[in-house]
Image: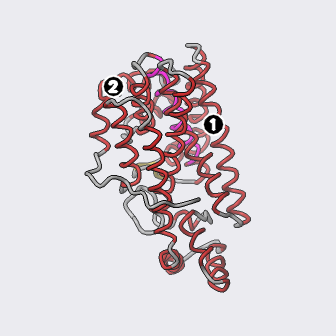
Amino acid sequence: MQVSETLIRSDRVRSISEIRSTVQDDLKSFRRYFRQSMRSDVALLDHVVQYLLRQKGKRIRPLLVLLSARCCGTVSESTYRASALIELLHTATLVHDDVVDDADRRRGVFSINALWKNKVAVLLGDFLLSRGLLLAVEHHEYELLQIVSEAVKRMSEGELLQIEKARKLDINESTYFRIISDKTASLISACTASGAASVGAPRESIEQMKLFGEKLGLAFQIRDDLFDFGVKDVGKPLGIDLKEKKVTLPLIHALEKASSSERRTIMRIVKKKKKSASDLRHVSEFTVKNGGIVYARQCMKELADEARSVMSEFPASEARDSLDDLAAYVISRTR
């Protein structure tokens, strides 16, 4: 990837709450759709769903849907359904991820599988996914269904490719970007594309919004991967990627710049089943020394700039400014 010297603008980065205020009323309508779509007359299922609803996340994905819709037209019932569909899908993947990772906490609270065991968690994820699909089918939202289904396919492929590469440990920069494009950027781009589609935007605008989401999603994931090399308070343990043999952009670049003996030493550590705190610190220091952190930050900033360049092609509006600010927020966030 070619890295430019372009930097994110130097003025104050708006907080996520400030950005959210642009569509505060729309978010209230989204929450109503989201709650209604999760209702069940099965007591156990409803009990677990209520537990999920009490957890407060940033809701970045529905925010993206709503801002993209406002950037391209007038928010409609279709937009609220699109945002609920995306959040149902995202929540389902998180529940399933916790089962796969055997994680007992999510954002500081007990995960579904920790409280109700894996079987309930898997079935809950299936329920949420099916509710999202039915929400689209029942209202004949076939374009939204196609956009989201494509994202599900790509997310699955990205996760499986990452598992394959974690076993073989033969990942390079090109493969890394393919993984994060499918695993993370696919859903972010589905948010922005479905927002545009929900207001009847022309095909060109939908594709431009999809491109914006793709660039934003790549920058978002690189920021997450940078957390693994020194920022502790981000909702995931320091060094968790290394513990799971996930080789990300900072380390990939550092390995390319290192001597053959250094590479062998670091890869021996990465291949270990159990890594000590000293091992993790050694890999982190190696990555910093060989320019991996600086390079990853430059890539992240370039992708955010590219996203903002795409956004500049849309007519000026408060929603466009908020999407522009969201690109700046994504790469400056601390969690």
For disc 1, the neighbor class at 10 Å (few under 14, some 14 to 19, many from 20) is many
Report the disc number at residue 152: 1
- Up the image or down, 247 lies above or below 60; here it is below
Q: How is the image coloured?
A: secondary structure
Q: Secondary structure at mark 2?
A: helix
Residue type at mark 1: give it.
Val
Q: Is residue 155 above or below residue 150?
A: below
- SS for callout 1: helix
- What residue do we see at 52% from left, 34% from top? 208
| Amino acid type of the residue tagged 2 in the rendering | Lys
Q: Is most of the magenta stretch helix, strand or loop?
A: helix
Residue drawn at x 50%, y 63% is: 296
Residue sitting nearer the eye, 1 or 272: 1
Which tag, 1 or 2, sits closer to the chain's start? Answer: 2
Q: Quadrant of the C terminus?
A: bottom left
Residue on which disc 2 sits = 28
Residue 72, by quadrant, is: top left
Instruction: Tell me the CA gap for discs 1 and 2.
Output: 26 Å
Q: Which residue range is magenta in the image?
A: 78-97
Query: Farthest residue in the bottom direction?
Result: 261
Q: x, y percentage for residue 313?
A: 44, 35
